[in-house]
Amino acid sequence: MKFRAIALLFCFGVCVPLAAAEDWSTPARQLADKINGAAGPGSAMALTFNNASSLTPSDLADIRLAMESQLRTQGTRIVEPAQADVEVRVTFAQNVRGYLWVAEVPHGHTQEVGMVEVPRAQRATVAGSGNAMVLRKTALWSQEGPFLDVIPLEMNGASGNALLVLESQYVTLYTKQGSGWDVLRRFPLDRVTNQPRDGRGRMILTSLTDLSVYLPGVVCSGPVLPLLNLGCEATDDPWPLASDPQSSVKGFFSRSRNFFNGVLSGSLGQGRTAPPFFSAAQVDEKSSELWLFDGTDGQIQFFNGSNLTPAEISGWGSDIAGVKTECGLNSQVLASRTGDWNTPDAVQAFEIVNRQAVPVSGAVEFGGPVTVLWTAPGGTTAVAIDHNLTSGKYEAFSLTISCGR
């Protein structure tokens, strides 16, 4: 949660860097002391954590437990935001020297900031399964109103000169004309009514003559060329969870909500049910198929087709997507970070090693919350859409991973 605008920012305390970063208990205790000193004894406190560093989810879980334990020892009660007297935001950043832990504590009309600097040990610079990877974003499209999905196309032998854009009521085919875009065809989606407030949708393209569009309660299909022409049917058929059109793994989307209800179908489902989830990602683990479900309760679940296992992963937002590359383990997960609709977002690449999420790239920053993160056709890249808090526009980006620095 973002704090309200403040008139003054006051930093309390100057910390002494630690000799080693392997033991998080000392800096966790130092920062907890600063938080309690600013908030006062006996507070009912809500904590939110924002990871803008290469700390692993396992490290973050250890740090959080250590901080909460120290806060409780001094009489602070850790509660949900609705019951809190004070809401404290803790951000983990890093520079060339190491990590910087920053706690923001509201104090009247000001906000006090406590900082602890933690030198980075060799083991904390996680390299995953190989060399560090680079996650890049490339702008694809922007417009004033919201849209749900976008697919770059290759037409007339040139790549990137056409674009499919999905809105809640239309699919539009744009073609590149100089430095701008022209509407080649805008097709209204029949039978699409009463969409949820924060609706979602997805396009699956297998060829220029085979496009499928999924919206809550509606599936449309038809060719893109020679003329974009779709037929729509009111149905609750499940949506594909993978970008590969040959994959039979699907999930049922809640018609009046913005998430999957947990009922699965296809080779992975076989009548099984997962907790309701916002998004899913497929990864490879020891030559077997493994899925991650990002639940509406904020928990990540592993599913291998027979067992559903809670994952010890924290710091992820509600959007994840799997990609296959030539880097590392050849299979990565892109994940947004925790935050709210008034907070700039970021996406980072991870690999799953022994059921742990290991960061393998730096985070790519966005100008606002990420509203969509889908694996793109082909499975080697992803599409992210954000709502830029400065311009107010909705923006689409292609996310790609390259090997090495």
Image (cartoon, helix red, strand yellow):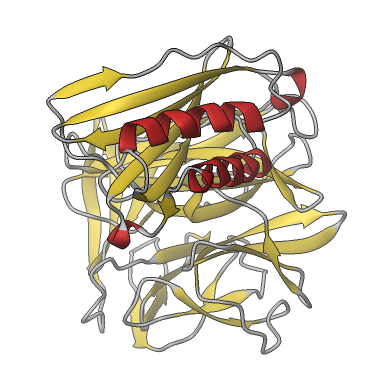
**Of the pair 255 and 316, the residue shown nearer to us:** 316
Q: Quadrant of residue 165?
A: bottom left
Counting every numbered tag in the picture gives 0
Q: Residue at x 71, y 29 (%)?
A: 23
**Of the pair 146 and 228, the residue shown nearer to us:** 146
Q: Is residue 190 left or right of residue 317?
A: left
User: Residue lying farthest right?
Assistant: 286
Q: Residue at x 25, y 19 (%)?
A: 10
Q: Is residue 377 visible?
A: no
Q: Is residue 160 left or right of residue 54?
A: left
Q: Residue at x 16, y 46 (%)?
A: 144
Q: Quadrant of residue 80?
A: bottom left
- Residue 38 image offset from top left, x and y in percent: 33, 31
Task: Work out which quarter of the rendered image holds the C terminus and state it.
Answer: top right
- Residue 276 image offset from top left, x and y in percent: 51, 76
Question: Is 257 placed above or below 199 here?
Answer: below
Q: Is residue 243 visible?
A: yes
- Residue 125 image offset from top left, x and y in percent: 69, 23
- Residue 85 image offset from top left, x and y in percent: 27, 51
**Of the pair 15 and 181, the residue shown nearer to us:** 15
Q: Residue at x 69, y 13 (%)?
A: 19
Q: Quadrant of residue 55?
A: top right
Question: Is 319 placed above or below 264 here?
Answer: above
Question: Is 361 placed above or below 227 here?
Answer: above
Q: Is residue 47 left or right of residue 143?
A: right
